[in-house]
Image (cartoon, rainbow, N blue to C red):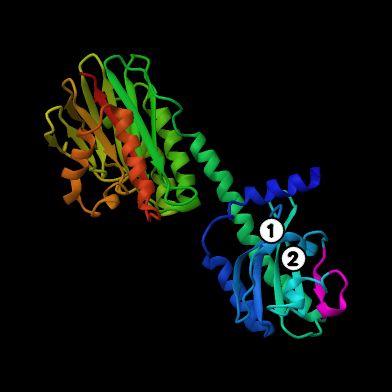
Amino acid sequence: MAAEQARLLDLAALDVLGRDGEERFDRVTRMARQLFGVSAAAVTLVTETEQLHKSQSGPMWLSDGPRETAFCNHTVQQSEMLVIEDATQDERVAGFPSVTGEPGIRFYAGQPMTGPNGHRVGALCLVDDHPRRFGPDEQALLAELATWVQRELDRSSELENAARVQAALLPVGTPRVPGFEVAGMCLPSGGVGGDFYDWHPTPDGQLVVTLADVMGKGLPASIITATVRAVMRTTTRDSGPAEAVREAAAALHEDLERTGRIVTMCHARLDAVQHVVRYADAGHGLMLLVRADGSFARPPAGGLPLGVLADEEWTEGVVPLAPGDTVVAFSDGVLDLFDGTTDCLPEIAAAVWDCVDAAHVVDRFTVLAKRVGIRTDDVTMVAIRRTA
């Protein structure tokens, strides 16, 4: 019982259940069916009660069904490849509905697949409607193809772990700044992304806020994201926004140049005494001041992204906040929730103005992003509102 529970946890850790078909698995099943000339090739997953077909190729359609009458249920119970050359002559499966009825399976070969902790969770399998021999050379070829599927499953596990780490690096809770509300959100387009936001207090009682977008997506961008976050944390304790960006750019330039990445950034300090946000913009340009009366302005952008020039200089801008005013900085993924261009800024401003507080702002855009469904870019936003 404990072993089965561990196996199910391994399956869940792959984060592939409940997803639509994926080309990374489909290309392997297509190739396997063509190479072996079988009626069907499939990647299967064995849950607590069912066998599910993650991918399949061929004229023979393999339906999901109960685990107890699934060929792959036997495969996941052994470490070696399972080969059944004539299903009608094998007492383990001869009575299965898929043998006695449709689709009339006669031949089966399955190589077990494992989860991140080595528990067998499914198989790459071949199925045919007539008995056939399956010798050592063919078995070796199927095992080789199965390593491609296994690499994809391992990658799924790595991305899931990376997503948990990346989420853990985002701020927890909301900062307490007298007279102000601060909130943020970040939704990667995939498991991990290239956007991040961060905030932390300074020794003089101000709040430092950073929103950045690393060019690219996926695991490579997320690695650079973590590096940028760490550098910004070390350069912003005593420096103003423009100086902090300059110091970070100098520290990061060699790494960004070698990896071919650039980083756009809005880096700011909230001065609750003066009621202003001082900021430096590094090629980001997506910031709005939404006033309490519903009007809005776009604070000036300035300077190149990090990673372009080693000796770039950035200027400091100031956004005064009257009671009820909200300033938002966001990634270009927010534009994609509308028409994808800056023509939609009035719509974004209207959506911000209609919210009751900063948390409501980020919640509204979180819901909007999730309604859109599949996104090609990360969606990130930070909102600062001066209370009325």
Q: Quadrant of the C terminus?
A: top left
Please tell me whether residue 184 belongs to the stretch shown in magenta.
no
Q: Residue at x 34, y 21 (%)?
A: 238
Q: Residue at x 26, y 43 (%)?
A: 284
Query: What span is colored magenta in the figure?
Result: 80-92
Q: Secondary structure at mark 1?
A: strand
**Does the residue at mark 1 contact the one at mark 2 (Cβ under 8 Å)?**
yes
Residue 145, relative to residue 114: is it above or below? below
Q: In the image, what residue type sits under mark 1?
A: Glu
Sooner in the amino-acid sequence: mark 1 or mark 2: 1
| Residue that mark 1 sits on | 50
Residue 96 is marked as none
**Where residue 46 sits: x, y (%)?**
70, 58
Residue 211, relative to residue 76: is it above or below? above
Residue 303 found in image quarter: top left
Q: In the image, what residue type sits under mark 2?
A: Ala
Residue 174, relative to residue 349: is it above or below? above
Separation of marks 1 and 2 at Cα, in angstroms: 8 Å
| Residue that mark 2 sits on | 70
